[in-house]
């Protein structure tokens, strides 16, 4: 089976199973999305938070022209930490764009402008097989080039991307035809996760009020604060919520934040924790978006 086709099979099979949390943080829904038949065009920003809007087709389009789409995550990098990015791809094996294929595609233009990067060479080709919940990955030679820190980040990106699916419990890497690593889970790369991970909304997403903001956090007393800023730094909405786990553990958070704007405009969703000592904003994650009423 071709390398990237194997990735597509893996993701397609996983989509049929319920989502799993893996070792650290929740997995995305990884659900199948079928574009609707003739329906009115959606209001800008009404797509599910963190997901690109599904293109609507006209009443004369045939079912063959409306491939089912799979929503999933690829894990990239921002600074020296991992960064979750949403993706949506057709489920056909021939696309070769699922899981590792999408990871090898790297960042979108909006993500690159927001400082998101990848340690994996663009267009990298991966061999992939799955048995007993263990994904065996054969990366290209370039995967092992550079510093140990760079190699570790590449491995973390692959492990987090593959273990979002309940069919994958761990990953091993091969090199030169032989296994190079033990079975690796997300916990092996816990130090590469930032204190706050934002899984929705996605960088560059068009959102509307109220915007759903969600992800995972390991913050003091589990308190997660969110706010919406205009491009000049003005705060137009703020709220706080609690993660499902407190200090020393990573929990999930989700909060709907209403706001008011007169029309579509650039904005920023910021997620942070407040210092118990002086009220400063700590570990802030900024996600540029387009705000709509």
Image (tube, grey):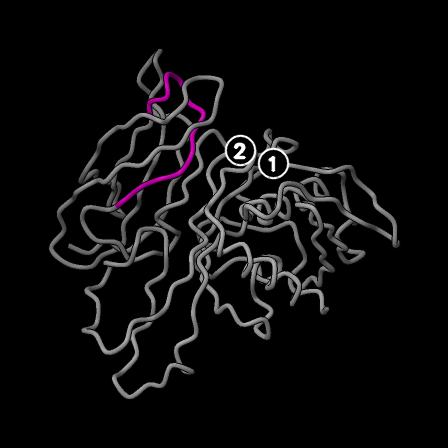
Marks 1 and 2 sit apart, C-alpha to C-alpha, by: 6 Å
Q: Can you name the residue that lies furthest to the bottom here?
A: 60
Identify the residue at image location x=60%, y=51%.
118
Of residue 57 and residue 156, the one placed in the foreground of this image is 57
Q: Which residues are magenta?
A: 212-223
Residue 81 lies in quadrant:
top right
Position of the C terminus, as image quadrant, is bottom left
Q: Considering the numbered disc 2 on the image, is that residue within a helix, a strand or a loop? A: loop
Q: Nearer the viewer, residue 212 or 110?
A: 212
Within 10 Å of the Cα at label 2, are there few (<14), some (14-19), or many (20+) other Cα atoms?
many
Give the left or right position of residue 57, taking residue 215 as reference: left
- Residue 20, compared with residue 43, is above or below; it is above
Q: Which mark is residue 24?
A: 2
> Does the magenta run of residues contain 221?
yes
Relative to 285, 188 lies left or right: right
- The quadrant in which the N terminus is found is bottom right
Q: Is residue 100 above or below residue 230?
A: below
Q: Position of residue 10 (x, y in %)?
A: 60, 58
Give the vertical position of 97 relative to 247 (above or below).
Answer: below
Asked if the residues shown at circle 1 and circle 2 are in contact, with their CB atoms under 8 angstroms apart, the answer is: yes
Residue 179: x percent and y percent?
A: 84, 46
Instruction: Please report whichever mark, 1 or 2, sits nearer to the chain's N-terminal start.
Output: 2
In percent of width and height, residue 259 lies at 16, 44
Query: For mark 1, does the 10 Å Cα neighbourhood hold few (<14), some (14 to 19), or many (20 or more) residues?
Result: many
Q: Position of residue 291 (x, y in %)?
A: 23, 53
- Residue where numbered disc 1 is placed: 186
Residue 96 quadrant: bottom right
Does 115 appear above or below 252?
Answer: below
- Residue 27 in the magenta stretch? The answer is no
Residue 142: quadrant of the picture? bottom right
């Amino acid at each position: 089976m071709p390398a990237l086709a194997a990735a597509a099979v893996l993701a397609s099979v996983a989509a049929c199973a319920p989502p799993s949390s893996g070792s650290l943080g929740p997995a995305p829904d990884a659900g199948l999305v079928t574009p609707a038949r003739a329906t009115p065009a959606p209001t800008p920003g009404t797509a599910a938070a963190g997901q690109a809007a599904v293109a609507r087709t006209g009443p004369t389009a045939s079912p063959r022209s409306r491939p089912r789409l799979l929503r999933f995550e690829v894990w990239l990098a921002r600074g020296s930490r991992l960064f979750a990015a949403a993706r949506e791809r057709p489920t056909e094996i021939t696309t070769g764009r699922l899981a590792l294929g999408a990871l090898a595609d790297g960042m979108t233009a909006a993500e690159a402008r927001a400082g998101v990067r990848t340690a994996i060479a663009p267009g990298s080709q991966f061999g992939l097989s799955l048995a007993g919940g263990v994904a065996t990955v054969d990366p290209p030679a370039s995967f092992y080039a550079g510093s140990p820190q760079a190699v570790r980040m590449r491995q973390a990106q692959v492990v987090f991307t593959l273990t979002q699916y309940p069919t994958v419990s761990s990953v091993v890497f091969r090199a030169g035809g032989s296994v190079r690593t033990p079975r690796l889970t997300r916990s092996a790369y816990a130090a590469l996760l930032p204190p706050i991970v934002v899984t929705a909304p996605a960088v560059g997403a068009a959102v509307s009020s109220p915007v759903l903001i969600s992800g995972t956090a390991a913050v003091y007393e589990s308190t997660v604060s969110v706010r919406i800023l205009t491009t000049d730094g003005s705060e137009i909405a703020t709220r706080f919520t609690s993660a499902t786990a407190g200090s020393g553990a990573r929990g999930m958070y989700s909060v709907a934040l209403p706001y008011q704007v007169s029309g579509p405009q650039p904005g920023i969703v910021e997620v942070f924790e407040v210092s118990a000592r002086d009220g400063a904003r700590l570990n802030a994650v900024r996600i540029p978006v387009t705000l709509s009423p």
